[in-house]
Image (tube, rainbow, N blue to C red):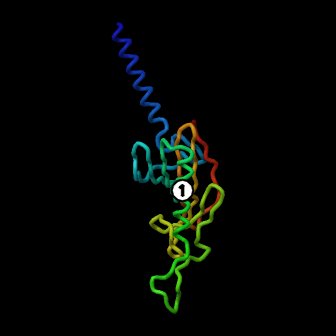
Amino acid sequence: MKKFFIFIIIVVTTIYLIYNRNQCKYLGCIDFTGIKEYKIKDIYRDEKNLYSALYIRSDNLLRVEMKSDASREESDRNIESRTTTIKSQFENSRSPYPGEISDEIKCDDKFKPIYRDGYVIAYLNSRLTYGACSEEGNAYRSLLTWQYCDKQKKLYQLEFIYPKDKFHEDRLEITCLD
């Protein structure tokens, strides 16, 4: 009888640990309007401290990157680095072949990202990358935002991607489910 109780305790403990370990997997630890409508399209990375994937909901996409075991300071640096990387793609640069047409390569302000408090609005090409500076080159618009969850020690980078003609700047209220 004693062995049976020990066995039951081990099984219950194992189930509890597995449940708690997987409880906050993927998007399960945050909430925003419509989150349950997104379905996984592609998982890019699924490692111990890094998860990145592409989700789909009708005709819009959600690109997610989640970093675990991240401090607030590390997360702030990560956000600053990502924002700086995006900005650098749209800075004017010298033409490799200066001449009569132009000495400089530059992007029209219309296609440059817009930086707001806590998020970035930008155009993306058909391969979901930044940098196209023409109407024909841009297929999507995105709203890139971040959410740091203190209790989870996780940084979520969420990029809501819409066909450019269906984009709307409604920033969702994202909450941590601690």
Residue sitting at x 51%, y 76%? 136
Q: Where in the figure is residue 48, as x and y percent of width and height? A: 40, 42
Q: Where in the figure is residue 49, as x and y percent of width and height? A: 43, 44
Q: Where in the figure is residue 169, as x and y percent of width and height? A: 64, 60
Left or right, residue 13 beside residue 32: left
Check disc 1 and give the amino acid type: Glu
91 to 13, vertically: above or below: below
Q: Where in the figure is residue 145, as x and y percent of width and height? A: 58, 54
Q: Nearer the viewer, residue 162 or 69?
A: 69
Q: How many marks?
A: 1
Residue assigned mark 1: 159
10 to 161, vertically: above or below: above
Residue sitting at x 45%, y 51%? 52
In which quadrant is the C terminus drawn?
A: top right
Disc 1: CA contacts within 10 A as few (<14), some (14-19) or many (>=20):
many
Q: Nearer the viewer, residue 151 or 4?
A: 151
Q: Nearer the viewer, residue 19 or 145?
A: 145
